[in-house]
Image (cartoon, coloured by chain):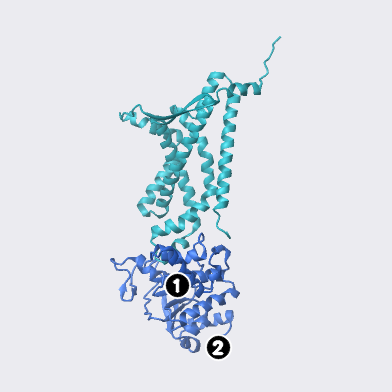
Amino acid sequence: MIIQDRPNPIGELLIVLEYWDHIFAGFLLTMWLYVWALMMGFFLGLILANLRQYGGWFLSRISTGYIEFIRGTPLLAQLFFIYFLPSSLNIPVGDWKIETSFIILNKDITIILLDYRTLAGLLALGLNSAAYQAEYFRGAIISVGTGQLMAAQSIGMSRIAGIRHIVLPQALRRVIPAWSNEAAYLPKYTVVVYFIGVKDLFSQAHRTVAFTFISLTTYVLIAIIFLVTITLISKGLDILHKKTMIPGL
Amino acid sequence: MQVLKGVSFELGEGEVKVVFGPSGSGKSTLLRCINMLSPPDKGEVYLRGQNIKAPEVNINEMRARIGMVFQHFNLFAHLKAIDNVSIGLRRVKGFPKEEAREKALEVLDSVKMDEWADRYPAELSGGQQQRVGIARALAMDPDVILFDEPTSALDPELIGEVLQVMLDLAKSGTTMIVVTHEMGFAKAVASEMIFLGEGVIIERGTPEHFFISPKSERVQNFLQQLDVLYGSHEKLLK
């Protein structure tokens, strides 16, 4: 007679949770990557959108070219390109790192905030996100309409001042619902750094599986962590959208 | 495509020039050429003897002296009425915040919109928005104000309040170029009227000239059509 062990999800979860410090460290690193990449993408994307919209013949083509190149190639390929570029050019990347440690519930948690791998990951994610964010911003800028900038110029504001004080404040309000797409996508995109050995949430999950041999429960747990995080982000942006709404519109 | 051909006129201090004509005749383009929002390929614009297209001229400074009121108001949607009026004072003229606010309130008062100072454009009626639009232009103390069909996007019952403000301005000596089909307004205050068709001046003259004895058939037909729409001009002449 064959006795089949029934999987016990609760028991498995308890075993997986014994590695909570790894998973927590991975989560913190994922969020760290996410926040910086999103911010880098925000500012660079804003610049790209403005160049594409207002930059004139040359700069708008440069910006469009960048956006189409990034959107047309795989993120993983972009990551590998950045990661391997220095060594293939014989540029030493150095063995350096900035890390932080703290103790929670008697567990020592160490996170590498920045080293060569993390930097490559951050750059790839930020440069990639910028292209997508740029198109959200450009859409919002177009939706504000040319009449606003014309009115700004008619009272003597320079084109740049009109963009800065009249167009962008409106475009940034309008962009929030569409832009929340990027804010919700990016945490999941960060998992590509697993391939270059950054210890993010996904990589820590993989490690936990290696220790426990419990794969499904571990990955479901990771999925739930992403789900909760992204739901909170979406909700936060929804509140921001409502709070910044222009009265009467 | 050439929109305006050989259009040339002078506007004296305190004069009101009314430009009218069929759509597509270049009326709005003419106004946008004057403040260089659509810089003309050829031709010059002089403001108090200064060629505003000259390379040494800062076009932003010139535009601050040429007010503009738009058909669709173009109020800054994210700013309250008061801030729509004061932003030019602050960002262009460098007024301190409090002074800009005081002056903006005064100007809003002159268009009877001071009560609505803290409302956003979307909370105002079209007529109210346009009066804020006029206040925004006025606040800069411009040498001349360009009006681009200021009442044609308004519901009929809101036109009066805007025209009243414009009449008051004209009577108080504001120099204005007004693109409009409000012939009553033209009759009341225009020092000269210009009929534009396909980018050329077809006929120009005083309101009396236009309403009593327009020369060209185009103008006669056009005025007749306005009669059908808005009633006879005979009444306006009294």
Q: Residue at x 53, y 82 (%)?
A: B184
> Looking at numbered disc 1 in the image, what kind of residue is underneath it?
Leu
Q: Nearer the viewer, residue A49 or A210?
A: A210
Q: Which residue is mark 2?
A: B234
> Looking at numbered disc 2 in the image, what kind of residue is underneath it?
Glu
Mark 2 belongs to chain: B
Give left or right: position of A176 versus A65.
right
Colour of chain B, in one word, is blue
Q: Residue at x 44, y 30 (%)?
A: A100
- Residue A104 drawn at (x, y percent): 52, 27
- Residue A52 drawn at (x, y percent): 41, 51
- Distance between the alpha carbons at the discs numbered 1 and 2: 33 Å
Residue B138 circle label = 1
Q: Residues within 10 Å of mark 2 (few under 14, many from 20)?
A: few
- Residue A81 drawn at (x, y percent): 39, 33
Which residue, as the protein is rendered here, is positioned at the far right? Answer: A1
Classify A165 as above or below B155: above
Chain letter tied to cyan: A
Give left or right: position of A1 versus A12.
right
Q: Nearer the viewer, residue B122 or B94?
A: B94
Same chain under badges 1 and 2? The reply is yes
